[in-house]
Amino acid sequence: MSLGRIVLDQSGSGALEISGEDDVRGVDKLVVERVGPYALDEVVGRGSSGVVWRAFDEVSEEVVALKMLDEATASDPMARARFARECELVGAFKHPGLVRLRATGSAGTVRYLVMDLALGATLQKRLGQTPPLTVAAGLEIVERAAEAISAMHAGGWVHRDVKPANIILGEDERPRLLDYGLAARMGTESGARLTRAGFFVGTPLYLAPEQLLGAPPAPTMDVYALGVTLYEMLVGRPPFIGDTEGLLTSKATQDAPDYRGPAPVRELLRAALARRPGKRPQDAAAFGEALAEARETADEALDDILLPTVQPHPDQATVSTGEPSLPPDPPSDQPAPVSEARPIMSSAVRMRIAAYLDGRRPPPPRSVFAGSRRDEATWAVGLLAAAAASALGALGSGNLLVGPF
């Protein structure tokens, strides 16, 4: 394959056609006309994960999306790893609710990924627009998103970054899931490695507590993220807001505030947002079936109730603390957010919290609260609070002690 490129020099005057093998350093603008059999039309997305073009496939005579790493992101190992993960999933999923990855290839030194062209607004953007959706329409969107994610689960994959920003709505407001850069096989070695190291990947606001601890990939993680997405739609904000350490403490020690709407939906949210994964619907198919039943049994006229307008909130970026990844594309007028890269707590404390979330009662340490005896429930909450304080470096003052482990 050949790559035709037009490079403008620093002054913007004059043009030079070069091949994909040539050195293009020192130029400030790069326009690509063709990649292999794909004629490029216009850029439809740009950001920290590269550039997405509207393209015409001259073989199939279809309009597609073509994603390439530009020169800046191609030199970023996190960007390359996330792009490579998506390339591995070409042809893996066939569901109308999943943006299909069609092909991958390289032209010269440039690697590209071809996928369905999905145009529309993300669910995140739609929830901030007027007129607002009705509750009935919102529940239907999440139910269809769950059906799409269930196709990934049936194939043995976990998305790991389900959130409104990764769900795009077409003109008919039918959802399609985007961005498979963090997808992983259920219970894979990479997930086990993250667990041992104490790292996590994903967007903290939407992550299950065990995912924040770096647990191996499991469908119940996507179920929790669907629950957060549904809760945010219905209430106007996520159930928990804060920095990474604060989110871990809240999610591991507190139940999500109750939704005050129809009882069947409220009960489903309680289950989906359960702190322990064993108490949630066990995959997206079970979640979708429960949501469909909740819609049918709700007493209220859901078509007459409007969803609240969701205001922008901080920390919606995808984060990596151990596995290379990139945040989603920022608005064109804003710089790309910087990914974190750090463990959130010691492995010993993390193992204790993981055991608590798994429903196993770990043996109590010699001293959790100095100079006093507490019942088991208070001890568990104290242990979790101490773990978060340890992550923040806040231990060492007062009478709160943890150890030995």
Image: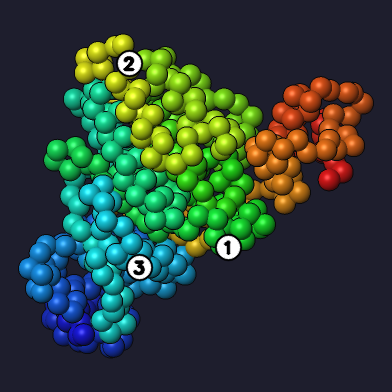
Q: Which is nearer the N-term, disc 3 or disc 2?
A: 3
Residue 393 versus residue 122: which sits nearer the camera? Answer: 122
What residue does disc 2 label? Answer: 298
Q: Which residue is mark 1?
A: 189
- Which one is in front in this view, the residue at disc 3 or the one at disc 2? 2
Q: Earlier in the sequence, mark 2 or mark 1?
A: 1
Hey, what amino acid is under mark 3? Cys
How far apart marks 2 and 1 lie (CA) works out to: 42 Å
As drawn, 191 above or below 146: below
Residue visible at 70% across and 41% down?
355
Q: Secondary structure at mark 1?
A: helix
Residue denoted by label 3: 87
Which of the 4 image quadrants contains residue 188? Answer: bottom right
Q: How is the image coloured?
A: rainbow
Q: Nearer the viewer, mark 3 or mark 1?
A: 1
The quadrant the N terminus occupies is: bottom left
* Residue type at tag 2: Ala
State the count of labels: 3
Q: Is residue 217 above or below residue 361?
A: below
Quarter of the image holding residue 181? bottom left
Looking at the image, residue 362 sits to the left or right of residue 42; the answer is right
Quarter of the rendering occupied by the C terminus: top right
Q: Residue at x 20, y 52 (%)?
A: 118
Residue 2 seen in this snapshot:
yes
Label 1 CA crowd tier, 10 Å (few <14, some 14–19, many 20+): few
Q: Which badge, 3 or 1, is on the more N-terminal residue?
A: 3
Residue 321, above or below 28: above
Res. 56 mark: none
Question: What element does badge 3 sit on?
Answer: helix
